[in-house]
Amino acid sequence: TGVTPTLTGFALTPAIVAYGASSPIITPPTSASSGALTYSSSNVAVATVSGTTITLVGVGSTTMTATQAAADNYTSATSTATLTVTSTTAICFNSGQIVSSVFPPYYSCNCTSVYTGDQCQNVNLGGLGF
């Protein structure tokens, strides 16, 4: 049997990000073990991870897990961080319709207040207010 290492310092910067913005950067955890680190997402509808690269997929929250493999006298260990992906602002067009890049494939709906080529106010996409 080995000793379970303590993983410290695992973080996502930023931990709250708007959909469509740059993906967060992973700060890997540190420990006394030399085991390899891998990362995973609990909700692949929000974000996926390949190596150390996070790809934003949709709006919501996911638990990102850093897993350190067993090595030498150490067992495997995990550490978690929460990633929250928020919605982006909808854009209005002349017709009073909006197309949102928040929830692909793109949905259309009416703007309550229309500002040609500018942002809408009081917008509702399938019950999700902006």
Image (spheres, grey):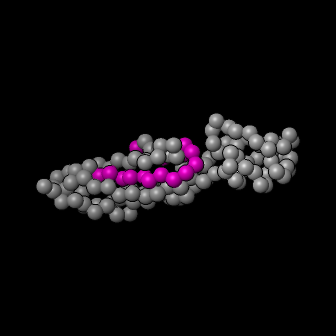
Q: Position of residue 49 (x, y in %)?
A: 44, 44
**Which residue of the protein is positioned furthest toward the left in this rendering?**
1
Predominant SS of the magenta segment: strand
Residue ID at (43%, 58%) = 81
The answer to whether one can see residue 86 in this image is yes
Q: Position of residue 40 (x, y in %)?
A: 40, 47
Counting the numbered discs, the total is 0
Query: Is residue 58 on the magenta stretch?
Result: yes
Q: Quick check: 56 left or right of 114?
A: left
Q: Quadrant of the N terminus?
A: bottom left
Q: Is residue 115 above or below residue 11?
A: above
Q: Position of residue 5 (x, y in %)?
A: 24, 60
Q: Quick check: 59 left or right of 71?
A: right
Q: Quick check: 130 left or right of 37?
A: right
37 or 98, which lies in front?
98
Query: Is residue 115 on the magenta stretch?
Result: no
The answer to whether one can see residue 53 in this image is no
90 or 111, which lies in front?
111
**Which residue of the protein is positioned furthest toward the front in this rendering?**
127
Q: Quadrant of the C terminus?
A: bottom right
Q: Is residue 61 above or below residue 95?
A: below
Residue ID at (50%, 55%) = 83
**Which residue of the protein is positioned furthest toward the top in this rendering?**
105
Residue range highlighted in magenta: 51-68
Residue ID at (29%, 52%) = 68
Q: Position of residue 93 (x, y in %)?
A: 82, 42
